[in-house]
């Protein structure tokens, strides 16, 4: 892990220095995770691809401000993806021409059934409920929940990615848990147990 | 079913990202870079910044050397800027445009950029690129801009030249891959952090780049979705393995 994060840190440094292919390799490393995260929210491959493109273009545009967590830009990318997914149309505005010009395969969109299956494949059963209740949370909190509950990051890593202190992140997460608990239907004991144990 | 990106879209997006990174000045201080280059006569690697100095001398890397002092112009809306006579050795012009307000811009090579919103507190958006002299109107750099767009443009005559690829004892070329440079062994960093080269044929095979039709790309994708491939990283001799390079995967 430390080798991998060291290698990624180096790639990122080289990309910042203007080595295009290094940025391409950063894209190769993370495009799968970012796409799945976007798909999880949007349930539509076309939109998820657009959101992924915006996330990586933003990664480059805002490169001076990117927070690298444990050698990786992935947490930051996922936070941006969260925000883009909230309003894909708004996220696309800056890059409409760029993304609109990208060619696409003639492959049809997956059917609704396939989409649901695809969505399920990136979710644990408890997370499906989370997905429906997470949307009402404030932006920063939502990113914290997404990173910790969905993507498996620690609270301190998630805090670093969104740029707040660990203490503040814990407070927000604990409030979010309370809110989510209230939002969960009473007949889903599994989901409740998952929330309490985390 | 595993969700994966449309391979055609992914390849095109990757290309855009690679170009963007390769053509951008280092964040924050593009002007200073040019001055340093001019003052010291140091050859900087294409799109260079501080860390790129480590790349200097790698075969196949582009060497861009200013041959004149940068010209900086502040303006509003479109403008034609006469750069004056081309200095000896000049082959291209580098430009760095900083948005001072929202607006869209077009450049002599047909490229365009836009600043959709301007965040006064943030880092200004910088677009930078190198254009060949042939796209200028004589010695005039014609900047297209929306009427109210405010901008700062820095232009420099440069000598740009791609260092030749090197050849190892096996007869394979090696160096940095880029526009017009397709070495057999491509400079890469192994997962252990060591710098070496991956064989292009192995990289292409692992990345599914050999598909020549959408149908082939689809078949390849179905067979390889979500898998990570590891290919060896060699010394420049193409034989001594010094590490592993990971391609694809989750």
Image: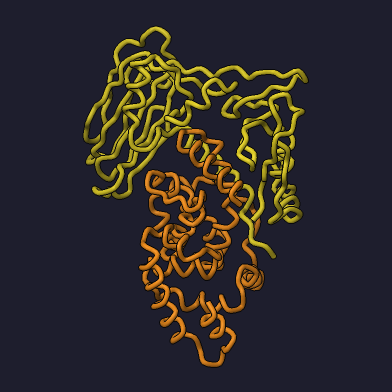
Q: In this view of the protein, which residue sits in the foreground, B163 or B155?
A: B163
Q: Is residue B29 above or below residue B88?
A: below
**Where A57 sits versus B32, above or below?**
below
Chain that the image shows in yellow: B
Q: Is residue B17 left or right of residue A170?
A: right
Give how far across and how far down residue A99 sits, in percent.
48, 48
Q: Residue at x 46, y 84 (%)?
A: A181
Residue closest to the far bottom: A187
Name the residue located 68 percent from the left edge and 56 percent from the top edge.
Answer: B226
Q: Quadrant of residue B13?
A: top right
On the question of residue B206 being in view, the answer is yes
Q: Along the line of sight, which residue is nearer the eye, A74 or B219?
A: A74
Q: Is residue A28 left or right of residue B109?
A: right
Left or right of residue B24, residue A110 in this image: right
Which quadrant holds the C terminus of chain B? bottom right
Name chain A's colour: orange
Quadrant of the drawing holding the N terminus of chain B = bottom right
Instruction: Identify which residue is drawn at 72% across, 32% down.
Output: B199
Residue B150 location in percent, x, y? 23, 38
Residue at image location 61% in from the left, 25% down from the top: B181
**Is residue B25 depicted above or below B250 in this figure?**
above
In this view of the protein, which residue sits in the foreground, A177 or B75?
A: A177
Q: In this rendering, would B250 be left or right of A70?
A: right
Q: Can see residue A96?
A: no
Residue B130 location in percent, x, y? 43, 26
Q: Is residue A162 above or below residue B216?
A: below
Q: Position of residue B235 (x, y in %)?
A: 69, 28
């Amino acid at each position: 892990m430390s080798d991998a994060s060291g290698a990624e840190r180096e790639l990122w440094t080289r990309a910042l220095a203007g080595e295009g292919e290094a940025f391409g390799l950063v894209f190769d490393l993370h495009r799968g995770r970012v796409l799945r995260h976007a798909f999880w929210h949007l349930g539509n491959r076309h939109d998820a691809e657009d959101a992924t493109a915006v996330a990586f273009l933003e990664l480059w545009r805002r490169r001076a401000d990117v927070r690298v967590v444990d050698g990786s830009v992935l947490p930051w990318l996922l936070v941006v993806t969260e925000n883009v997914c909230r309003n894909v149309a708004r996220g696309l505005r800056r890059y409409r021409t760029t993304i609109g010009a990208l060619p696409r395969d003639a492959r049809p969109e997956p059917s609704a059934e396939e989409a649901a299956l695809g969505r399920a494949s990136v979710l644990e059963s408890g997370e499906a409920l989370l997905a429906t209740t997470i949307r009402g949370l404030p932006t920063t909190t939502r990113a914290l929940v997404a990173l910790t509950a969905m993507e498996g990051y620690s609270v301190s890593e998630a805090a670093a990615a969104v740029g707040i202190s660990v203490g503040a992140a814990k407070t927000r997460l604990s409030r979010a848990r309370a809110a989510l608990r209230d939002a969960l239907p009473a007949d889903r004991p599994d989901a409740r147990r998952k929330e309490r144990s985390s | 079913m595993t969700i994966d990106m449309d391979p055609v879209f992914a390849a095109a997006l990757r290309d855009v990202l690679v170009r963007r990174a390769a053509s951008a000045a280092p964040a924050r201080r593009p002007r200073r870079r040019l001055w340093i280059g001019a003052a010291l006569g140091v050859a900087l690697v294409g799109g260079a910044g501080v860390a790129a100095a480590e790349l200097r001398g790698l075969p196949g890397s582009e060497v861009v050397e200013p041959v004149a002092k940068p010209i900086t112009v502040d303006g509003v809306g479109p403008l034609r800027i006469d750069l004056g006579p081309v200095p000896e050795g000049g082959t291209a012009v580098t430009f760095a445009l900083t948005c001072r307000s929202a607006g869209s811009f077009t450049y002599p090579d047909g490229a365009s950029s836009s600043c959709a919103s301007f965040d006064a507190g943030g880092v200004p958006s910088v677009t930078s690129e190198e254009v060949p002299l042939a796209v200028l109107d004589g010695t005039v750099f014609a900047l297209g801009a929306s009427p109210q767009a405010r901008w700062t443009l820095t232009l420099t005559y440069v000598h740009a030249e791609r260092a030749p690829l090197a050849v190892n004892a096996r007869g394979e070329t090696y160096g940095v891959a880029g526009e017009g440079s397709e070495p057999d062994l491509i400079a890469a960093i192994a997962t252990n952090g060591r710098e070496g080269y991956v064989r292009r044929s192995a990289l292409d095979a692992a990345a599914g780049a050999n598909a020549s039709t959408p149908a082939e790309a689809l078949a390849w994708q179905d067979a390889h979705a979500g898998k990570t491939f590891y290919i060896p990283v060699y010394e420049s001799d193409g034989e001594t393995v010094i590490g592993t390079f990971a391609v694809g995967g989750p």
